[in-house]
Image (tube, grey):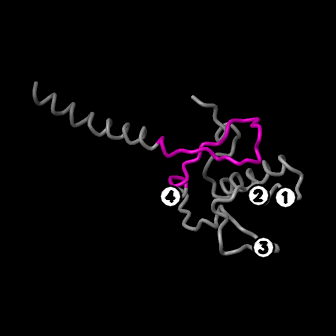
Amino acid sequence: MTNLRAKVLWLTFPALLFLAAAVWAQGYITEVEDSGFEKHTRPAVSFAHDAHNEAANIESCNTCHHMYEEGELQDQASIGMECSSCHLEGNSGRLELIRVYHLQCKSCHLEQKAGPVQCAQCHRKAE
């Protein structure tokens, strides 16, 4: 009977570790937020920044956080800036902001043939 208990312990311990790690990692998931969205028509997108970049093998912040000056891509990244700080200026407003978010994320997912591309895959209702 002791041998059986030892086997059960050895089999359940890794499963418990995995479960604990998954629960702990949930604390690092944040929502993509932008003050340009005063009212949401769909739930905000949950986004695990570091896990995404690791899975996508993204090393440069500029890959997603681009910065343009006079139509030229700059070496500096727009870290800490909301997309609306540029994409609401002189544009058609909220719909333009939604479009650029979708272009930035969805077009990369389509190009890389990886990642969510359907509305409900990103905009999930809270469980």
The type of residue carrying mark 1 is Glu
Badge 1 local density, few (<14 within 10 Å), some, or many (20+)?
Answer: few
Q: Earlier in the sequence, mark 1 or mark 3?
A: 3
Gap between marks 3 and 4 measured at Cα:
28 Å
Q: Earlier in the sequence, mark 3 or mark 4?
A: 4
User: Type of residue at label 2?
Assistant: Ser
Residue on which the image places disc 1: 89
Residue 80: image x %, image y %? 64, 59
Q: Kindly identify which residue carries mark 3.
A: 69
Is 78 rendered above or below residue 47?
Answer: below
Q: Tag 4: residue type?
A: Glu
User: Is residue 32 rendered magenta in the image?
Assistant: yes
Q: Residue at 77%, 37% (x, y): give it.
A: 39
Position of residue 43 relative to residue 51, above or below, is above
Query: Is 108 inside the magenta-drawn segment?
Result: no
Q: Which SS class for mark 2?
A: helix
Which residue does the numbered mark 4 point to in the structure image? 54
Residue at mark 2: 85
State the CA–CA distance, disc 1 to disc 4.
32 Å
First to last magenta residue range = 26-52
